[in-house]
Image (spheres, coloured by chain):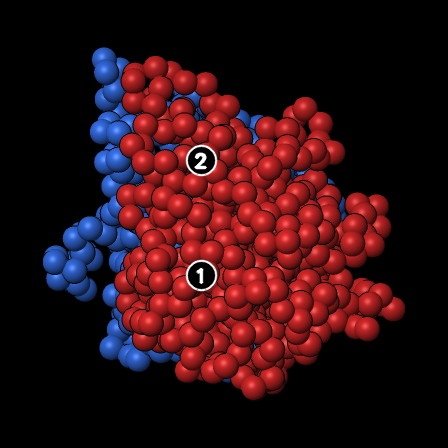
Chain colours: A red, B blue
Amino acid sequence: MNQKIAITGLGCLSGAGMNLAESLESMFRNQRYPHPPVRFNTDHPVSYPVLELRDEFKLPLDDQERVYARTSQLALAAALEALAAAGWDEASLRGKRVGVCVGTTVGCALNCDDFYRAYKDGDDPELDAIERFLRSNPAAVIARQLKLDGPTQTVVNACSSGTDAIGIGAGWLRAGACDIVIAGGADELSRVTYAGFSSLMITDTEPCKPFDVKRKGLNLGEGAGMMILETDAARGEKKACGYVVGYGSACDAYHLTAPHPEGKGLKQAMNEAFTTAGVSPQQIAFVNAHGTGTPDNDKVETRVLSEVLPGVPFVSTKGYTGHTLGAAGGIEAVFTVACMQRGELPANIGFDEADPELSGTPVAQNSKIDAQFALSESLAFGGNNAVLIFGKGDE
Amino acid sequence: MRLAIQGIGVSGGFGCGVAALRTALQTGSVEPQQACVERGDKVDNFPLYRAEIAGLQDFFAKRALRRIDHFSKMTLLGACLALQDADLLEADRSRTGVVIATGYGALKTTFDFLDSYLDFGYSCSSPTHFSNSVHNAAAAHVSMQLKATAPSLTVTQFEMSVPSALLTAQQWLAEGRVDQVLFGCVDEHCEVLRYSRKQFFADGESGPLQPFNFAQQSAVPGEGAAFFVLTRADEKAAYACIDSVTLGNHLACPVKLAQDDLLIAGADGHKECGRWYAQALKGREASAYAPLYGSFPAAAGFDLAVAALSLSDRTLYVSPGQDGEKTALTDESLSCLKFGPGGDYGLIRLSV
């Protein structure tokens, strides 16, 4: 059993809200805001709804730093919110060993299609887009902006990146690699992923409906979710808002984009998380499911949940945020801890009618919970599966 | 926790396999190939350390490799060579973790995907190119082709990718999550990268690569894959052991170099990174082998392979382009130091 790691601060922004409080408020009002993309255009004949941030966000950056890519700015905004909640600022972190572990997909891809279009046309485009890419590794940006000294890692495990980043960051603290870790995930909406997911025919033309019989696919979203993890020595008397108690991951080794039909890797990841947490499945009060709303994902996920955690309530929050890819695991981890603190789960928005082919139904209404332990899980391209188990914070 | 290096698989500008890398170290020079990019009426010839992947067909049927791109093929070849070197090609891999470090990922497939919609419209975007352009696609191909069902991780941190990913490989073994880690360092070259580097550095990359000329841009681009089979050091190492992996920022807190350690500097002709080596080394002697494989973020994996080979051969090979003879290695440890342009550093210490 692993030593539990204290979570001392949470931060997140997404299509559900510009910070954690706003996100929770809209989720518990059961409101969501999908619409056609505003930040980019395509000539795609079908318009798929997305969940973009509803406002501009401001960061304390100078002119030179404003060239960071949007993903890194999202990561930094969520990190600053989480640090403030944990009572840290740049000055008080000086002299500490602070690690940064961030999951992303878009944030590390050279997706500069305007630049590339000009290059293909035989022009000699300026390198602004390339320079922005080279400056914008999300973990490096947070470390650079806060002048941190410690390990940095950007995890690119597709849609499980954020979950993996938190599990890895907690491991750094247990191994003594640093005193504090800023961990989570961040991703921006992009024309490239919009085109990519539509080519895979797994996006819904309407607001997504995770676990519903009429589900047709996902809605893309953007955002970031970060948490501050600390050793007991670093946090002193500071109360924890939750604990990372278990982490597991495994690869299906089955298909590049489809999950294993029996959820082999997901079960393996869950079992590892239970073992490292020293927690039995019966102790899990709820699950923040991956729940993308694609036919395959929801089928596999409910199958595994019904086998491993029968009767345990589960909810997908992607109806509120969209699928934020590398950010999803970070955002959903933050929501999981926040819901444990609040003692309440939001309704799985988009779910209306049970699918007889699925082995379970999600939480359909806002529900009171008293959770000592909760689980958040992510499934990803490449057959990756990652699972985190959280413990309740200090009273 | 110490890690033992049980197998090495390399493919780069020097050739393919440990023997090719050893030959390159012994001869002290590798000539880059001449590459050419034609765009409209512009013809651009430049030196490039290109990786050879023909040997992959010794491990997989051609059919199994269709729809797998060059980046993933380099990755698969490196992985198979390392397993073969460790005599583990036929072993069960249900407790073998896969950790891949890459600076840029599958660049060519990323642009192939953009081609699909820029040329034919968004409704014709290629799902195959999209799913293979995702950074962890190569790790997924390794897991699928080699039936490795334990945890899989891809890390991208530009120049720090290798030490950062190695930190997690070390952690997985220390926590007992896996019994072995297939640890790979991979980057590929593509013509857009050449265009960008030429715009940034003009003729600064026409060679020869001079790692210790810190004041001048002399990087020559390269590509390749360096793989390692890592276990806990309670098993005897086939090559050497990794004692520690340290990451930090030299500006925030200067790197601490052990007084007696021999050093392999990851200096690769990038002026922006060179200044940090100048500051940290302060005139201290070090070796550098980038002229054998070129400049790319994951080349830090080749530095690690050279360190392991040097300790195993008990020989300190002469840095390419430097005078002198190879010398018997009397010290039992070596450290690999890699700097990024912002002063980020990774320090990997190895010993026999």
Instruction: Find disc 2 in the rendering and name its residue.
Output: A36
Residue lying at 66% horizontally and 43% vertically, measured from the top left: A18
Closest to the observer, A192 or B322: A192
Residue lying at 53% horizontally and 30% vertically, measured from the top left: A132
Q: Amino acid at mark 2?
A: Pro
Query: Which chain hosts label 2?
Result: A
Quadrant where the N terminus of chain A sits is: bottom right
Q: Amino acid at mark 1?
A: Asp
1 and 2 marks on the same chain: yes
The spot of residue A42 in percent (x, y) is 36, 29
Closest to the observer, A150 or B19: A150
Image side of residue A18 versus residue A357, left or right: right
Query: Which chain hosts label 1?
Result: A
Of marks 1 and 2, which one's residue comes earlier in the chain?
A: 2
Q: Which mark is residue A115?
A: none
**Picture quadrant where residue B278 is located:** top right
| Real-space CA distance between mark 1 and mark 2, rounded to the nearest whole angstrom | 23 Å
A276 to B262, vertically: above or below? below
Secondary structure found at label 1: loop
The spot of residue A139 in percent (x, y) is 60, 48
B162 to A133, vertically: above or below? below
Instruction: Find disc 1 in the rendering and name its residue.
Output: A352
The spot of residue A229 in percent (x, y) is 70, 62
B300 to B212, vertically: above or below? below
Q: Residue furthest right?
A: A237
Which circle, 1 or 2, is nearer the viewer? 1
